[in-house]
Amino acid sequence: MNIMSHSNERDLQLLRKFFLSLVTEGSALITKPINDLFLQIDCEVGELRVYDDQDELIAHQEVFSWAETGSSEDPTHEAIETLRELVTRLEQKGFWSKEVFARPFSVELVRPDFSLIEVLLFLDEDLFNLSKPLMEDLDEELGVFMDSLLGEEK
């Protein structure tokens, strides 16, 4: 378990630098506002490919620890988890609020034919991405409120 998390942390650092390089002034690969980033994990060769909303390849990054662990059709759970963590960490640092990421904006994990595996991030001016613990508490409070409200009508 410890080896995996160490490897995962290394992959996260590598991918964080890779994503930062996509929008760094002077060497930016994303130069016009986009609404969607499509990510493809190829666990056969160990590579992450990033496409824009026109399905054009922007860049790719080798991730050696992913090589020969699966396929491009069926990425490993570990690779998907690493991407989920990366997208979340970048969100926490305000990365996705850069002007080049237009609203509404999504980051989607897709297969080579661009069929959806999972939406990793969705941002809109009017929508907020609420964390699960907050929603669980809200759900419980709403349940208590509804029970008391309905209890009064009996």
Image: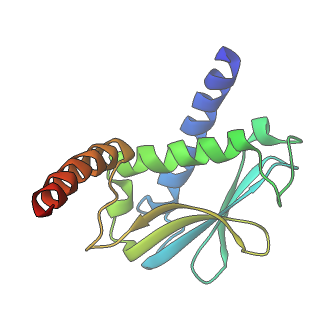
For image coordinates 54% across by 67% down, the residue present is 29
Above or below: residue 145 compared with residue 17: below
Whole-percent x and y of residue 58?
Answer: 63, 69
What colour scheme does the image use?
rainbow
Point out the residue furthest to the top here: 2
The count of marks equals 0
Whole-percent x and y of residue 115?
Answer: 72, 73
For image coordinates 42% across by 48% down, the residue present is 90
Horizontal side of residue 98 vs 29, given as left or right: left
Point out the residue furthest to the bottom here: 54
Above or below: residue 25 compared with residue 62: below
- Quadrant in the picture for residue 54: bottom right
Horizontal side of residue 64 vs 88, given as left or right: right
Q: Please state which of residues 61 and 105 is positioned toward the viewer in this rendering.
A: 105
Point out the residue furthest to the front here: 154
For image coordinates 32% across by 50% down, the residue present is 135
Whole-percent x and y of residue 151?
Answer: 16, 55
Q: Please state which of residues 137 and 80 is positioned toward the viewer in this rendering.
A: 137
Q: Is residue 17 visible?
A: no
Horizontal side of residue 58 vs 146, given as left or right: right
Q: Please state which of residues 77 and 113 is positioned toward the viewer in this rendering.
A: 77
Task: Tell me the quadrant of the picture where the N terminus can be found.
Answer: top right
Above or below: residue 42 compared with residue 119: above
For image coordinates 32% across by 54% down, the residue present is 130
Task: Tell me the quadrant of the picture where the C terminus can be found.
Answer: bottom left
Whole-percent x and y of residue 51?
Answer: 63, 71
Horizontal side of residue 145 vs 17, given as left or right: left
Q: Is residue 67 visible?
A: yes
